[in-house]
Image (cartoon, rainbow, N blue to C red):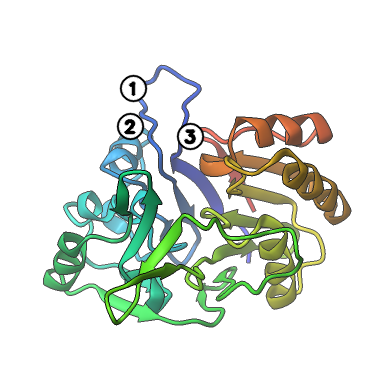
Amino acid sequence: MSGIKIATLCCNNVMTSAGLLAEHGQSFLIETPEASILFDAGQTDVAVRNAAKLGKDLSKTDFVVLSHGHYDHAGGLLALLDVAKNFKLVVHPDAFDEKLAMTPNGMMPIGISKEIVDKLAAAGVERIETTEPFEVVPGVSTTGEVPSANDFEKIEPMLMVRRADGAPAPDPLRDDLSLIVKSEKKSALLLGCAHRGIISHIERAASVSGVEKFDAVVGGMHLERAAQPQIDVTVAALKKYGVSSIVPSHCTGPRATAALMAAFPNSALPNFVAYSLSV
């Protein structure tokens, strides 16, 4: 499989004044000879609006893959459903759990809204719910659930989920997955938030895909609130993977992004709306 194009439709920053928008969210468009795939949808209508500015026709979307069930990755489904009706949704079943964030002012909802669930159902969107790796089309597949690969990557304790008895509990984020894109010669790993840890995601992706070295790792690495020692350990661990291009985004945070650019001066670049690569 060759000729796969990847473009960032939504992330936290832009590097051009061409009318493009940024928001706290993330969305990638993957175009293959067989299908048009959206990996996450951003928080609002920003991904849809940016796609129009970039000349990308989201009405032809065949699949949407959700990295996990948080609002900043799934909220944009509302706007997408206004322009695309015939896509299939690939998602872990836990993504639809009631997800919460523990804040000083109490529990804040951060999951997929009932409005989105109802609109998906009304549109007749087929949900492909799976915990396992899933081939979307040739050359594009999910990691499925990501097991922990080390003892230094931890899920933030502020992230919670509503239990069946109504009480909040720590969210294990079993729905946290990433997307593997590969051709005969190149490969890329797209991250949503990597709540379970970027190193764990790389290890899982390598295990299920057989890719020994990813040419690009792009997306959220969830180090924004990480202590400096964890950032240092993560950066050191990344060096052994020989990634040609590291493109931190979204929830990676400025300190971790700076550390990555210092450690990989010739291969690290912050993600931005309209960033693109071919695999």
Mark 1 vs 2, N-terminal side: 1
Asked if residue 65 shows in the view, the reply is no
Extreme-top residue of the structure: 17
The x, y position of residue 96, in whole percent, is: 32, 71
Mark 3 vs 2, N-terminal side: 2
Asked if residue 213 shows in the view, the reply is yes
Task: Please tell me which residue lies in front, 109 or 200.
Answer: 109
Is the residue under label 2 in contact with that under label 1 (CB below 8 Å)? yes
* Residue type indicated by callout 2: Lys
Task: Please tell me which residue lies in front, 127 or 6.
Answer: 127
The x, y position of residue 239, in whole percent, is: 86, 48
Instruction: Say few, some or many: other residues with alpha carbon within 10 Å of mark 2 (under 14 / 14 to 19 / 20 or more).
Output: some
Q: Residue 274 carries which label?
A: 3
The x, y position of residue 278, in whole percent, is: 62, 48
> Spatial distance from mark 1 to mark 3, Cα to Cα?
11 Å
Instruction: Say few, some or many: other residues with alpha carbon within 10 Å of mark 3 (under 14 / 14 to 19 / 20 or more).
Output: many
Q: How many marks?
A: 3
Q: Which mark is residue 19?
A: 1
Q: Residue at x 40, y 72 (%)?
A: 91
* Residue type indicated by callout 1: Gly
The residue carrying mark 2 is: 53
Label 3: state its secondary structure.
Answer: loop
Is the residue under label 2 in contact with that under label 3 (CB below 8 Å)? no
> Spatial distance from mark 3 to mark 2, Cα to Cα?
10 Å
